Each structure stands twice: as C-alpha cells, then as structure tokens.
C-alpha cells in the first residue's frame, strides 16, 4: 500500500514539475535569441565603448576616450549636425503632411481606398530600391525632374551633387517612404473620434476649418504626439535608402549616425570602440523617445 | 454676404453628410490627392520604364520617357548574368524560413504569456516588449562581434535566427490568444492532451488571424531588410536582393540597365502582396502601430 502511494506521489510531483516547467519551455527559444542577440550585445557594446580596437580581437582600455573623441572630433561633429538637421526636418514635415493627408483622406469619399493605397505604396517598397529610384529621378543631367525644370527655365540644380540639396533630397525621400505609415496611424486616430461631435458642431454652424482646428486637432493631439515621437526615432535610425540615394554624400552631407557606426566596423579607419560609443549615445536618444512614446501611449489609452 | 455664409454652411455639411460638394474645399482636397498620386506614381513609373531602356537611351539628353526600343533583354540578361538567380533564391529562402521560424517561436512565447501563470511572467513580458527599445542600429558593432564569434557570419542561419524573435510578433499573437477561452484548454487537458498538443492543435488554428498578420509583416520585413543581411552576408554567394542591388549599383561592373531590371523584379513580389493583402496590412498598422 505504502509503496503504491509514494509512487503516485512521485508521479504527481513529476507532473506538477512538468506542468510548471512548460511555460518556460515555450518561452525558451524566443528568450534565448533575445539574450544572445540583443541583451548580450547591448551589454557588450557598453563595455567595448570604453576600449579601442581595430580588429575586434585585441582591446585597449581608453576609459571615456571614445566619448570624448565623439564630442571633440570635427568629423563626428558634422555627423551629429547632419543627423540633427535630418531628424528635425524629417520629423516636422512628416508630421505636418501626415496630418494634412489624414484629414483629407478622412473627408474623401470618392476613390478613398485608392488614395489610401497610393499614399501607403512607398512604405511597402524596398528602401534600397527607393534610393535607386530617386537617384535616377534626381540625376542632374539625365533625370526627369531637371529636364522638367529646364523646360520651365529653372536651371538644373545638382540635387545629389551639392551638399545642402543632398540633405534636402534625403529628407524628401525619407518622408516619401514613410508618410503613408504615419498617415494610416493618424487616420485610425481620426476614425476613433466620435462623429456626432462634428455633426453637432456643423449644425451649430461651424465651418470646416473651425471643426478641424477646434475639434479634430485637439482630439487628435495624443496621436499626433505619437507620430512626432515615432518619426523622430525613425529619423535617427535612417540608413538604408540614403545608402543608395546619396551614399552619404555629397561630401558627407547626408552621412548620418547609423552609417557612421556601420563604417566604424567595415571601413577604414576601423574603430570598434568608437562605433560602439556612438551606438550607446544613439541608444540613449532612442531610449528617451521610446520611453516618452510609452508614457504617451498610456495616456492615450486612458483617454 | 449672404451667399458666402450659405456656401460656408454648405461646405461644413458636405464634410459630414456627403452631399453635393461646393467647390473650394473639394478643389483643394482633390488637388492635394492628385499631387500626392503624381509624386508617388511618377518616379516609380519612370523607373519601370527606364528598366526597359538600353544604355544609350539611359544617357540620352534630354531623357526619353519611353524606350526607343523596348529592351526586354534587360530582364533576361539579368537572369543570365550576375548570379541574379542566386540572390533571388537567397532572398526567398531567408524570407520563407525566417518567417516560419518567427511564427513558430513567437506563437510559442505568446501562448506561454497568454495562457499560463508562472513566476516571472510579467517581468519576462515587459522584458520582451523592452526589446523594441534596442534596435539593431544601436548595437551594430557588438552584435556583429557576437555573431562572428559564434561563427554565424556568412551563413544562412546568421541571417535567419537573430532577427526571428520579434517583440511585436509576440505581443500581437498574445493579445489575440487572450481572447481564446481557457475552457477549450481545460477540456483538452481533461481529455489527456499534452501541453504541446494543446498549443499545436488548439491554439495555433484558432490564432490564425493573428498569425496571418505577423506572417505578412515578417515577409515584408525580411524581403526588404538591408542592414542585417549587409552585416552578415560578406560573401557574394549569400547576398540577398537588397544587398546585391546596393553593392552592385556602386560598382561599374554591372551595366545600369541590368541593375534597373533587377530592382524592378525585386519589388514585384511585394506589390503582389500589397494588392492582395492591403486591408490586413493597413489594419495591422492602424490597430497595433506595427512596422
């Protein structure tokens, strides 16, 4: 009798133990990848940022030398300036245009689905190919844009040849790629607004402009803030389409921080430590904005 | 004066009730949308037309809208030369295998988070979501060092595995699984089904809509991904299409007309997905801010 009850006990304990282990087993593959390929590299990145290495094998401790270099080096200063310029213009015009087109699409009835698909189309395209497309269109000599401008007597600006125009082109193409994404999110926010509010306002004789300004925009503020934050984060991460649009040129005018980090690992002068330090700084910036986004998201849910 | 007020009132009515439109606002709206359509479609159309030109046409001044002679050979040449088939295969292989792996491990994690009570669950869930805050760009160098110390540089697994665990995938599938009633699981347990069987036979089929959304997004992410394969595929044999296009474009070895044809072919699968899955994609973004 006694033996059978301990056997039953043991079996129950085994099943209990197995049952308790189950969720961890389900989580294991995902977590293992996170730990190996995100958490561990993140920790290692912080560590490496205090070292100097040109081969990834031998590391020389330099203390905060890499960080000092980042804040003192004129090359890095120009990268920081490019990135800041890009992010500010990209964020501002992405948000503005996304708002405009979300309002327009929300009112549009005729062919609305078609226009929504059009604005969203670029989001789907490979950024590398988008870079190639605009590189072709903006070509100084044989590009269609300049041909058109010349026909109007507007000369032929060197879009991808002159530094300020290169930056303008990068910002424009960046917006061209992502605008649909932001617009869709704003459009969803707009559709969440109670329509009876506009109807009541319209009955009271409010004009469309008044409705937009006094009712819709204030109600859309939380979603708009999220677009501001998301576009800022995306701006800091930009790399792929710029790589094929300008390659970071002309004269380094569109080399942003991600390209700089990439080049510290793959282009001479190879400086793993310096690149890692730049990565840590980029992380801090993105972290701040993501945290802000999270807080805003909470607020939005609470509304 | 009176007519102005009237027209204003009419215009505010139109925006809401879809009556016959008064002109100014509708003109503004229409011209904005037509400009948008032009700015989106014109460059893409130009690019596609260019992919049928020969090199003489491509350097003609002023440029020609239509090719003098349609060079379908650009496309056949691309397949014959420059290992285009290999790049295409690499892209397809990485996209398909990575998407399957993502669906598998993300849904497993989602199942655990949605349907089990265990110590550390909430902490691990927050940890999973926190991964969004560490994008590839900020750990580019250390992740490259880690991946190369594991011997994964220049391997398919190196391109597939590290990005297979996505926080968004876990989140979206978990949210969906929360809506599946626990009674189904309980009764399956009563019938003696094992836990993995419950996951595979009950949860996965029921979570299909969420899995479909993640599948579409994973395919798009992977197909268009550039930075990660650029890091891993140092060897030309492993180039995916975006990597091949970006790097071939920089060299003068490959004629530009061939690069154009390759680029156009690389966006065709995405356009197909977009045409057929547009609703799911746009709703996925609208509801969850997926990207």
Image: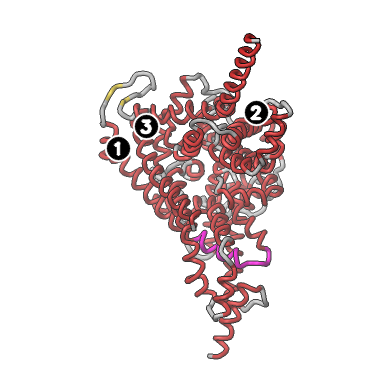
Pointer 3: what residue?
A276
To which residue does mark 2 refer? B86
Instruction: Pick the quarter of the image with the N terminus of chain A.
Output: top right
Q: Indicate yes or no whether the magenta region holds residue A101.
A: yes
Where does the image place residue A6, in percent across and percent down from the top left? Answer: 61, 12
Disc 1 element? helix
Q: Secondary structure at mark 3?
A: helix
Point out residue B264 in the picture as x, y percentages from the top left corner. Answer: 64, 43
Chain ID, mark 2: B
* Cβ atoms under marks 2 and 3 closer than 8 Å: no
The chain carrying label 1 is A
Magenta span contains residue B169: no
Q: Compare residues B163 and B25 and report the one nearer the observer.
A: B163
Going by the image, does B127 lie left or right of B283?
Answer: left
Q: Tell whether label 3 touches label 1 (CB within 8 Å).
A: no
What range of the chain is rendered magenta? A97-111
Q: Which residue is mark 1?
A: A70
Q: Nearer the viewer, mark 1 or mark 2?
A: 1
Q: Is residue A233 above or below residue A217?
A: above
Which residue appears at 59% of the width and 61% of the height? A191
- The Cα–Cα distance between marks 1 and 2, rounded to whole angstroms, is 41 Å
The extreme bottom residue here reads B2
Q: State the mark number for residue A216.
A: none
Which residue appears at 61% of the width and 31% of the height? B108
Rendered location of residue A282, percent (x, y): 38, 40
Q: Tell me which numbered mark, 1 or 3, is placed earlier along the sequence.
A: 1
């Amino acid at each position: 009798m006694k033996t059978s009850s301990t056997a039953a006990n043991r079996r129950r304990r085994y099943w209990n133990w197995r049952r308790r282990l189950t969720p961890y087993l389900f989580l294991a593959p995902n977590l293992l990848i996170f730990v190996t390929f995100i958490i561990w590299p993140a920790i290692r990145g912080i560590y490496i940022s205090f070292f100097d290495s040109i081969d990834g094998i031998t590391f020389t401790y330099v203390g905060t030398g890499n960080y000092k270099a980042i804040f003192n080096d004129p090359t890095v200063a120009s990268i920081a300036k490019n990135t800041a310029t890009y992010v500010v213009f990209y964020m501002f015009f992405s948000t503005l245009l996304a708002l405009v087109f979300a309002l327009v699409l929300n009112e549009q009835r005729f062919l609305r689905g078609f226009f929504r698909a059009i604005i969203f189309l670029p989001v789907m395209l490979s950024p590398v190919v988008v870079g190639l497309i605009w590189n072709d269109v903006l070509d100084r000599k044989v590009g269609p844009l300049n041909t058109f401008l010349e026909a109007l007597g507007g000369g032929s600006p060197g879009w991808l040849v002159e530094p300020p125009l290169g930056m303008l082109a990068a910002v424009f193409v960046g917006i061209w790629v992502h605008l649909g994404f932001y617009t869709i999110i704003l459009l969803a926010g707009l559709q969440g607004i109670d329509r009876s509010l506009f109807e009541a306002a319209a009955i009271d004789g409010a004009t469309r402009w008044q409705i937009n300004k006094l009712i819709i925009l204030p109600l859309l503020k939380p979603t708009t803030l999220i677009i501001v934050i998301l576009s800022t984060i995306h701006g800091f991460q930009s790399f792929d389409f710029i790589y094929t649009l300008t390659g970071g040129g002309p004269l380094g005018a569109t080399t942003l921080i991600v390209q700089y980090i990439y080049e510290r690992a793959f282009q001479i002068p190879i400086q793993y430590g310096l690149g890692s330090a730049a990565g840590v700084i980029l992380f801090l910036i993105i972290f701040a904005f993501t945290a802000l986004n999270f807080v805003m998201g909470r607020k939005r849910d609470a509304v | 004066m009176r007519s102005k007020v009237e027209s204003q009132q009419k215009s505010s009515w139109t925006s809401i009730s879809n009556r016959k439109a008064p002109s100014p606002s509708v003109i503004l709206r229409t011209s904005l949308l037509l400009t948008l359509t032009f700015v989106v479609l014109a460059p893409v159309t130009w690019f596609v037309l260019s992919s049928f030109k020969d090199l003489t046409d491509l350097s003609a001044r002023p440029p020609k809208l239509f090719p003098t002679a349609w060079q379908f050979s650009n496309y056949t040449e691309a397949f014959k030369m420059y290992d285009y088939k290999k790049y295409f295969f690499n892209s397809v292989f990485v996209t398909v295998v990575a998407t399957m792996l993502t669906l598998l491990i993300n849904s497993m994690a989602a199942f655990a988070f949605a349907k089990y009570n265990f110590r550390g669950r909430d902490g691990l869930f927050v940890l999973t979501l926190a991964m969004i805050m560490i994008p590839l760009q900020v750990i580019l160098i250390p992740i490259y060092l880690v991946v190369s110390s594991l011997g994964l540089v220049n391997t398919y697994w190196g391109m597939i595995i590290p990005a297979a665990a996505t926080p968004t995938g876990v989140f979206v599938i978990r949210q969906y699984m929360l809506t599946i009633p626990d009674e189904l699981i309980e009764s399956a347990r009563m019938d003696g089904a094992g836990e993995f069987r419950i996951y595979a036979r009950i949860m996965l089929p029921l979570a299909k809509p969420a899995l479909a959304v993640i599948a579409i997004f994973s395919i798009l992410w992977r197909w268009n991904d550039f930075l990660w394969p650029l890091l891993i595929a140092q060897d030309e044999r492993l180039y995916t299409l975006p990597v091949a296009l970006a790097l071939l474009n920089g060299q003068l070895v490959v004629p530009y007309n061939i690069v154009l044809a390759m680029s156009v072919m690389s966006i065709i699968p995405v356009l197909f997905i977009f045409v057929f899955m547009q609703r799911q994609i746009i709703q996925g973004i609208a509801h969850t801010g997926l990207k």
